[in-house]
Amino acid sequence: MNYKRLKDRPEYSGMILFSIFLVIYFIIQFLSDSKSFFTMKTYNNFALLFKSFTPLILITMAQALLMFMGIIDISIGILMSFANVLAVVLPSYLNIPITVAWLLVILVVMGLSCMNGLIVSYLRIPPLLESFAMIFVIKGINLLIMPKPGGDVASMVNKIYDNMIFGFIPFSLIIIVVCYMIWKYMSKTVLGRNIFAIGGNEKSAFATGINIEMTKIRVYAISGLFVALAGLSYTAAYTTGNPITGEIYGLQSISACIIGGIALSGGVGNMLCALYGVGFLLLVQTIVPKIFSMISKQSGMVFTTYWHNLLSDIIILIGLIVTLLFFNKTGTNLGTRLMMQFRRSENGKKK
């Protein structure tokens, strides 16, 4: 693939930003510990990112599936927390094997996601409003089940999750690859083509005979599968339950998708966009604390996590602005795309 063709692809913006910060990441690693930089320690530190950020990566992939159709769901983060809480509570509450309990978690989360699809498709409620309301519903259920963070998970689960396949492939990376392959298969089917047809122009897709409602519900179900796997990954990584920790993931996943090159209006993008975008986010969140740590060692100043969050958010905001201003392929700005979201919802109500 030549450079011109690459530049015209939707993932180009995310790839550029991800590549820049990947280089910065390794430069910071070298400056902070030059003696062990060319050892397995550097690779292990990088592989550790997959363990910590796999939930966010999977959530972003789930969000991308919906954004391909022009749908934004800000509730998928708290839905991940629901999966996490259920995964901790069910084995002891029902006294069933953890594998059976976790399969049940996947089915329940997919069912809830399908319910979101039903509400959006048949009741014609705007996705943004529906998902905003769903945040409070699911959060209430989470807090009812687990009022505060806690619970125990079998240590064997964490050992499996921490395992390196063949000594160098993180187990969490396998989960991401499996989800990506699910998408690759989908993209070659009628369902995959219908997703982008609906995102490109829902009225035209309806006129060609595409079942809009059923397509949306199916995509919501697959998105729910990714969310459930994100919740289980969080459970395996941290061996505890937290009823609200995933709430911020919903907004972060939207940012990652936009930075990666997925259009808010739908119809533009691919799963590589989501992966590059979330890769940029996780590198920023990893690099910034290292920078402040190096400054602290040199100056003796102490920086709280508030400073970390401030700088991280500023960098992410700049990434969003750069993407929308310089890498926009659709000719519409952010405000226009948001208006298209509401217009699409209004048009759906009139059907």
Image: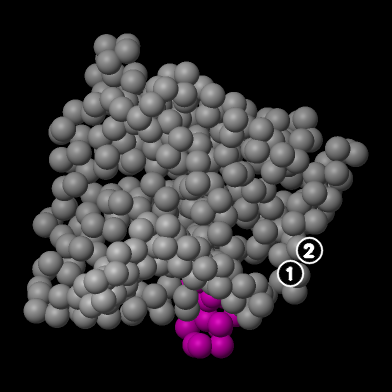
Please determine whether, in this image, residue 191 is positioned above or below residue 139.
Answer: below
Question: Label 2, on which residue?
Answer: 336
For the point 42% across and 53% down, which residue is it? Answer: 57
**Three-letter code, disc 1:** Asn
For the point 63% across and 55% down, which residue is it? Answer: 68
Q: Residue furthest bottom?
A: 3
Q: Mark 1: which secondary structure?
A: loop
Marks 1 and 2: CB-CB under 8 Å?
yes
Question: Label 1, on which residue?
Answer: 333
Q: How many discs appear?
A: 2
Identify the coloring. one colour
Q: How far across and how far down the image is residue 128, in percent?
A: 69, 43
Q: Residue furthest top?
A: 94
Helix, strand or loop: magenta stretch: helix
> What range is drawn magenta here?
1-15
Q: Is residue 306 left or right of residue 203?
A: left
**Three-letter code, disc 2:** Thr
Q: Quadrant of residue 82?
A: top left
| Front-most of residues 73 and 35 | 35
Q: How far across and how far down the image is residue 321, in percent?
A: 62, 72
| Front-most of residues 6 and 295 | 295
Q: Is residue 128 magenta?
A: no
Q: How far across and how far down the image is residue 241, in percent?
A: 34, 31
The tag on residue 155 is none
- Res 169 seen here: yes
Q: Is residue 104 left or right of residue 319?
A: left
